[in-house]
Image (cartoon, rainbow, N blue to C red):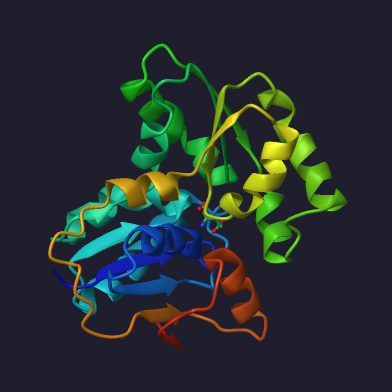
Amino acid sequence: MARIGIFDSGLGGLTVVKEIKKKYPEVQIIYLGDTARVPYGTRSPETIIKFSLECARFLVDKGIGKLIIACNTASAYAYEEIKKIVKIPVLEMISYGAAGTVGYKKIGVIGTRATIKSGIYEREIKKINPGATVTSVAAPLFVPLVEEGEVAGELIEMAIKKSLEELKEVEALVLGCTHYPVLAPVIQKLLPGVKLINPAEELARGLDVKNGAVKRGEDEYCFTDMTERYTQTAEMFLGGKIEGKAERVSI
Ligand code: DGL
């Protein structure tokens, strides 16, 4: 199988790469982070779809065998549109996050404003977990705080406490945004006993990499913008160094 193409609105999607590499270190990937236009989660559906289609086209033109929409916001709005223009298998985050809720009845979901407004997590969860009650909360403050490296300490705890007030009663919480898995330890501290569901972990578990085991070359990491701080932020999401070629691209 040709390498797997993975795109996100920025660097957060590297939390998805991290889970895939943990499970399948031998798989060859090409990552696209639209860092010049991040965030997507505050934008209109039309813009999210337009940007996502551009990302998908860029990766398809690179000759990939499978496309993963690592961004929850792009998954919420652009999956159906991308499927129309792409002839290879396309995976998105929402169905994997929803699948992780099976066995729990009181479910919480956090995501960007756009993801929560779409209502897609709630619909997908109820489809495969009928009888579940779903409380969805937009947590827009988390993205800029995480990007600033605020992943522990007073500031992020205050933001989390404020956002999670409505979620105290849930049994399981879907971390419905690429940035949230890095906050899992502090969220868990504030919501002890709540099962945290990371859609990236669920996707990696369900990923079919048949014939993809042989690495024929370097991984490639493409970004539409690269600032001085990008390496530091990328490593925070990836949980280690970028191994492979990193380059700036125009899409
Ligand atoms: N990648 C986005 C998501 O998973 C978060 C950042 C953004 O708003 O673009 O929803």
Q: Residue lying furthest right in this view? A: 154
Q: Residue at x 19, y 74 (%)?
A: 214
Residue 10: image location, x then y, percent? 52, 67
Quarter holding residue 127: top left
Quarter holding residue 49: bottom left
In the displayed structure image, the side of residue 74 where residue 142 appears, left or right: right
Q: Residue lying furthest top in this view? A: 131
Q: Is residue 121 above or below residue 249?
A: above
In the displayed structure image, the side of residue 217 where residue 203 appears, left or right: right
Q: Is residue 51 visible?
A: no
In which quadrant will I find the N terminus?
bottom left
Q: Nearer the viewer, residue 137 or 14?
A: 14
Residue 178: image location, x then y, percent? 52, 54
Q: Residue at x 72, y 45 (%)?
A: 186
Residue 236: image location, x then y, percent? 62, 67
Q: Residue at x 65, y 56 (%)?
A: 143
In which quadrant will I find the C terminus?
bottom left
